[in-house]
Image (cartoon, rainbow, N blue to C red):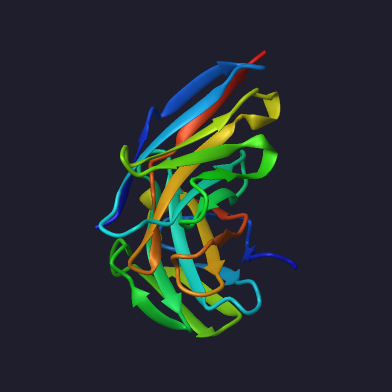
Amino acid sequence: DAGVIQSPRHEVTEMGQEVTLRCKPISGHNSLFWYRQTMMRGLELLIYFNNNVPIDDSGMPEDRFSAKMPNASFSTLKIQPSEPRDSAVYFCASSPGTGEETQYFGPGTRLLVL
Amino acid sequence: AQSVTQLGSHVSVSEGALVLLRCNYSSSVPPYLFWYVQYPNQGLQLLLKYTSAATLVKGINGFEAEFKKSETSFHLTKPSAHMSDAAEYFCAVAGAQKLVFGQGTRLTINP
């Protein structure tokens, strides 16, 4: 079992550029979650999907953020345009059924926006 | 709505001493509760979970937690701290198709 896979692991970009973060959930899992972690705000849930359908995106900070899940094995989180305050570690997690079951986290993508 | 409060953002203990990390929850239904651990530069990893079976739950690495409904608590303990336990620990409660995480407690182990 490969676990949740995220890419890239590190990303450095300049303000105004588009950033795309990628996630491959554990095979057979039905729910997928995107989180952001910063020292100031801790761990924040941005959006989650169940069976590839977005269920709750109330945590998405603003319209610059968008997420898609075109199929059961792939999801993207896009920031356009990026800003320095978006610098954080972004985690993807998946769970077998609903989000109320154990969630399995990926290693994260560390994003730095200059 | 479900929520958790972790008491103490930073806990420091000596190697070999008891570890106690506190978590109180709020839930309108019998809760599912979780403890996760995050080592530096890694994602969160499940330590243990409570799903209304036994009130004392044993997890990995010698950790355990006791569900106390009367106190709405789910504190995490380990009898003897090891240097490798240094990490951040998160308590979480299930609700509305997601997990609600606490703010985390950073555990430091002194030699």
Residue B107 visible? yes
Q: Residue at x 45, y 79 (%)?
A: A50
Camera-side residue: A15 or A26? A26
Say which quarter of the image contains residue B75: top left
Decide if residue A90 is on the left or right side of residue B84: left
**Quarter location, residue A59:** bottom left
Name the image quarter holding the C terminus of chain B.
Answer: top right
Give the side of residue A25 with respect to residue A39, left or right: right
Which residue is at 38% across, 69% downward? B97
Residue found at the far right of this picture: A1
Relative height, residue B59 to residue A64 (above, below): above
Task: Between residue A55 and residue B7, name the one nearer to us.
Answer: B7
For this view, does B24 lie left or right of residue B77?
Answer: left
Name the image quarter holding residue B109: top right
Left or right of residue A63, residue B109 in this image: right
How far from the left and from the top, in percent, is residue A53? 42, 83
